[in-house]
Image (cartoon, rainbow, N blue to C red):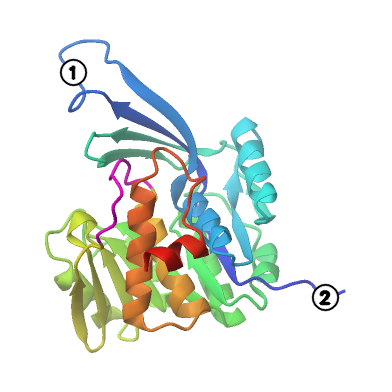
Amino acid sequence: MAKPSFDVVVIGNVGIDTNVHFYSDGPDFSVEANFTENIDVLGQAGGYASRGYASLGASTSFFGCVGADYSGKYIKSVFENEGISTEGFFIDPLGTSRSINFMYRNGQRKNFYDGKGHMKIQPPLEVAASLLTGARLAHFNIPNWAREVLSIAKSAGAVIACDIQDVVSVDDPYRLDFVKFADFLFFSSANHGDPAPLIQAYLNINPSLVIVSGMGGRGCALGTSTGVQFFPPVALDLPVVDTNGAGDALAVGFLTSRVLDGRSLEESILRGQISARYKCAQKATSNCMITRDLLDHYQ
């Protein structure tokens, strides 16, 4: 019996986030104790992306590491219950990765990421090759080990999307492999007022890229060989309570629309923005990624 192929294989980070929600405007470091609401969430880029694709009806597999611990077993059980293939799980001996997110009342955050052994761990490349055979889309996050899978995805003929997260400098050598291999590139402009110079610099490296930069409350930017377009934020009658996972939702909504559904770039941007905006209305959870019915409704 032939092994089924997947619409998308998500390659990268999954873990447990502890979101620390402040009751006031932020921490008071002049005293020892602050009272906060602390919520543990199945999250990180691969967690939000995998659950986002599954929620939109795409057949999804995850390739990445967890620890041989309670958190790793929990993540695997959630994925299995949602029909996300866990055949690509492998073990990080240092444990499941963790994040602490300081969450401010306007929904913004400061992130403290512990990637455990991701810099040195060796992924089972034969498993990656098996999962990517026949896959339509390979969605990469950027743990260090994931760069070893880029050439396998290219050889498999999958469309490659790389989310390089909150870029500080375009000269960062850590991200260069992902930029060169990508067909679609995503990054957050949280550290930049204007993403256009970064978009142009990445296009100089890889002229065939389609680039999407999330700009938070200012909307997003789309960069191609024909130039840079800016799109205002979408207006939904929903509160902004938590921006965790918004960039992942933007990428998933866009890629599902463009790569899997064959929609135009402009319509895909809109659907990506709706997905991100909807995620911002969900507090401390990856359980409520947007569904296809809701996405169609809001469009």
Q: Is residue 145 above or below residue 16?
A: below
Q: Name the residue that disc number 2 marks.
A: 2
Under mark 2, the amino acid is Ala
Q: Position of residue 167 (x, y in %)?
A: 26, 58
Against 234, residue 160 (above or below) is: below
Residue 243 falls inside the magenta stretch = yes
Mark 2 element type: loop
Seen at 18% across and 18% down, the residue is 29
Q: Position of residue 290 (x, y in %)?
A: 46, 56
Residue at left 54%, top 74%?
137
Q: Amino acid at mark 1?
A: Phe
Q: Please identify the residue farthest to the bottom as the structure is shown.
A: 226
Most common secondary structure along the magenta stretch: loop
The answer to whether residue 126 is seen in the rendering is yes
* Cα separation between marks 2 and 1: 59 Å
Q: Label 1: how many residues lie within 10 Å, few (<14), some (14-19) or many (20+)?
A: few
Write down the region rendered in magenta.
235-244
Q: In the rendered view, does 233 fall on the left or right side of 253? A: left
Which residue is label 1 attached to? 29
Q: Which mark is residue 120?
A: none
Which residue is located at x 69 percent, y 73 percent? Answer: 5
Name the spot of residue 126 as percent of width and height, x first: 69, 66
Please indicate whether residue 210 sits to the left or right of residue 171 in the image: right
